[in-house]
Image (spheres, rainbow, N blue to C red):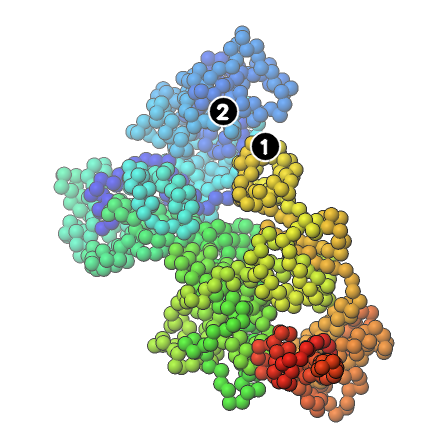
Amino acid sequence: WVFKQLYDKGLVYRGVKVMPFSTACNTPLSNFESHQNYKDVQDPSVVVTFPLDEDASVSLVAWTTTPWTLPSNLALCVNPELQYVKLRGKYTATEKIYILMESRLIALYKSDSEYEILDRQVHKLLFPGIALKGKKYKPLFEYFIQCKDKGAFAVVVDSYVKEEEGTGVVHQAPYFGADDYRVCMDFNIIQKDSVPVCPVDASGCFTAEVTDFAGQYVKDADKNIIKLLKEKGRLVHSSSFKHSYPFCWRSDTPLIYKAVPSWFVRVEHMVEKLLENNAQCYWVPDFVREKRFGNWLKDARDWAISRNRYWGTPIPLWVSDDFEEVVCIGSIAELEELSGVKVTDLHRESIDHLTIPSRCGKGLLHRVPEVFDCWFESGSMPYAQVHYPFENKKELEDAFPADFIAEGIDQTRGWFYTLLVLSTALFGRPPFKNVIVNGLVLASDGQKMSKRKKNYPDPMSIVNSYGADALRLYLINSPVVRAENLRFKEEGVRDILKDVFLPWYNAYRFLVQNVQILQHKDEGREFLYNENTVKESNNIMDKWILSFTQSLIQFFKAEMAAYRLYTVVPRLVKFVDILTNWYVRMNRRRLKGENGTEDCIMALETLFSVLFSMCRLMAPYTPFITELMYQNLKTLIDPASVQEKNTESIHYLMLPQVREDLIDRKIESAVSCLQSVIELGRVIRDRKTIPVKYPLKEVVVIHQDPEALENIRSLEKYILEELNVRQVTLSTNKDKYGVQLRAEPDHMVLGKRLKGAFKLVMAAIKELKSEQLEEFQETGTIVVEGHELHGEDLRLMYTFDQIAGGSVQFEAHSDAQVLVLLDVTPDQSMVDEGVAREVINRVQKLRKKRNLVPTDEITVYYRSHPEGDYLDTVIKEHMDFIFATIKAALKPYPVPTSKEVLIQETTQLKGSELEITLVRGGLCQCVGPACAYVNLKVCVNGTEQDGVLLLENPKGDNTLNFTGLVDAVSCIFGLKNSKLTVFNGKT
């Protein structure tokens, strides 16, 4: 039906055209098919002579990478406007004079000393190509010498001859090149009714007309042709040439270009309509519409839809022997009516024998032997799949054009193209509204994946090793979703498992473990999450992660509605890092209940809410791990809060709705500043190889925005903990510390824009003073050497001058907004604490190695050798600190024989041998709640009295500042009118 519509519109015709031809499949290919499989290959490169009839000592020299086309040469083409020259090679016979393009002398000679340009005035040796038009020359071979009487073997002109390659003289074999065919038609070297000079059969072998090479495959004949040309004295130069060449996408064999009779659909006349319809479609990424696909449409050519194969859908054309009478069939009923035969099968073997009586007295009409290009069937898919218009007419009209399709970037010359051509020709409309284009997945070396080469890992092995979700997320978080190619690497899938799934799963497991610990500690309390009854948390980190999650949901919905997977998935992956390495890390103690039960529940509810939202957002991309987590998480949801009808699977749930009331941009900005400070500080530690376990004295944070500093001040305790420093100093006075601004130019952006002035501007940028850059920081523009630069051109960096700052103990690092100075001066007490943290780290690693959980009661025994050394002293001095951290008793050897040893390990630390043993069960000692002592000195009527006050906070209530403490003590002890002096201490 589709083909009949095109035929009735006058869009189908039969013609001879130079087409990409597959000698392996014995069939022509369409233009877009030939562009699907290009490879870099080495082909023979030859330069041959064509002596002029008027003077055999003067020869035109032409270059080609297809020597097999030389037996079919009928003309030579030069550029009419470019300059040509006559010269004599110094190492050739004196009578040999060559003509070639002046700018292409390099094609024959490496230096000026190898040739001699004859006297320009006498011989007029420099001339435009048009001067050569019409000159006759001696053919290389005489297989088609009869064509000389019809104008062959003459020089023609056309501007398609360029000066970028070759000699500027292009040999013309009109039935083996599209440009050759066009040019030779323009100059009447050939006519439409000419007998084609095409001595190559469907298998790519020379026919009997080429007597010297008959039966030889053309590519194999290249060597023999070159040999014969050398014997004839017509070969000037022979070498090999690497270039990109089209291969058959089916057989993976080299294509040739060959004139063949084919059936065509007219496309060139509707290019403007194709571009108009393309503009109505929403493409992701959008550059495909304007660039890749749009450019292809602008140069669209008539579509050769016939193929010379047995297998395929028969073209429904019945023709007379002279092709003057053509009948196009549009339905089974029409074929039955015209042939008088019942039709039950439309394959070739069932209809090729059917004939239709001629209405013009031409006997019987027979079906043409060709079948459809399979892309014609693909492009007909919207109508063919519903048997339109014979059935489901309303269904198609309601559903057309399609809301959404997706395919690879190669389909811009395949399915996308044929869909658009047929839809435009039939209905004048685009066939789809929205389309996502993906890139191609290549082998790790950048080549196409090939079953023959086995240059890719077994997909099932990947899935079995890393899981389907890891493979899915690796692909969907790759350049492929931006219509770029991906070099597939197994380690990339492994990294997704390591960097995304394991941290994410550990956060989920951490939640579940601490819910169990909470319920174990507080028997009778059941943790059930109900978003309708959750109390609003006062903790700034809770507020931040909830706000960050809602911002993510908001972003997710907007970007998914715009089909931009390439922005959504990286943000989701980044969120896993934010959740695990920031929120969970900085709230571990709260989540473990160390700050009291109520605060623990608040933190657990926050983490549950975030993980539950995260699972629903990730479910479309990682369906299996999210289902696993959900099946456990849903047991912690209060049934009273469930609104969905079916909660059996996470894939039945709706995506979370955005809660605008939880979004707080100010808190998100504050935590972003905090993260910058911590990350910059970590870089300094890494640079100085100072582990975070070792405390440092001070970090100085310099920022020009006082509000940003206030945000950082509100989160100061997290900086103290994460950077393990004793003091945080905030300042806007960068001069005090010898801080200067420096500009870092974007070389790529400025290089393209400034071109020749680039080096001059770069030098001037280096000389810009801090005051100038501060002004640029405020205004966003600066003029350098007459060129106006903007924010995207320069990145401002802070630099630190130790001498100017007068503080050699600081190390500095900065980004575009904030500068961090870290005091790296060694301090023995801090080093000792760092060693104690190393001991803690060894114990915790043993716990993990033995698969112990936090609720497992253990006692830790240790032995340092030699006894009484530095390590032994540090452990004894920091016994309370170690005990408070590992939540287990720490005892020196020996280990009681009655104890069950869980794990034992000997390690080296600070030059000493440290042996650690974990045994089951804790010591029989009562561990009280967190407490501290305050010394009181009460002065009443001039009389002083000392006392000690024990402070406890067993439930994790809000802590008091000193002013509140003084007020509380005064109230409790009736000291309202007394003067209290408070000193804090350990005893």
Earlier sequence position, callout 2 versus callout 1: 2
Please name whichever residue, 362 or 635, is drawn nearer the observer in this view of the structure.
Answer: 635
**671 sits to left or right of 917:** left
Q: CA distance from mark 2 to mark 1?
A: 43 Å
The location of residue 665, given as percent across then percent down, is 48, 61
Q: Residue at x 52, y 13 (%)?
A: 125
Q: Residue at x 35, y 31 (%)?
A: 196
SS label for mark 2 = loop
Residue at label 2? 168
From this viewpoint, which residue is outermost toward the front? 941
Residue 148, placed above or below residue 709: above
Dividing the picture into quarters, in which one does residue 670 lie? bottom right
Please name whichever residue, 331 or 610, is drawn nearer the observer in this view of the structure.
Answer: 610
Q: Can residue 708 be spotted in the picture?
A: yes
Residue 78, placed above or below residue 336: above
Dividing the picture into quarters, in which one does residue 769 lie? top right
SS label for mark 1 = loop
The location of residue 417, given as percent across then percent down, is 35, 46
Image quadrant for the C terminus?
A: bottom right
**575 sits to left or right of 371:** right
Q: Can residue 43 be spotted in the picture?
A: no
Residue at label 1? 785
Residue 41, placed above or below residue 825: above
Q: Residue at x 33, y 42 (%)?
A: 275
Q: Which mark is residue 251?
A: none
The location of residue 945, given as percent across then percent down, is 74, 83
Specify the amino acid type for callout 2.
Gly
Please name whichever residue, 941 or 435, is drawn nearer the observer in this view of the structure.
Answer: 941
Q: Residue at x 22, y 51 (%)?
A: 1
* Label 2 neighbour load within 10 Å: few <14, some 14-19, many 20+: many
Dividing the picture into quarters, in which one does residue 674 lie? bottom right
Specify the amino acid type for callout 1.
Glu
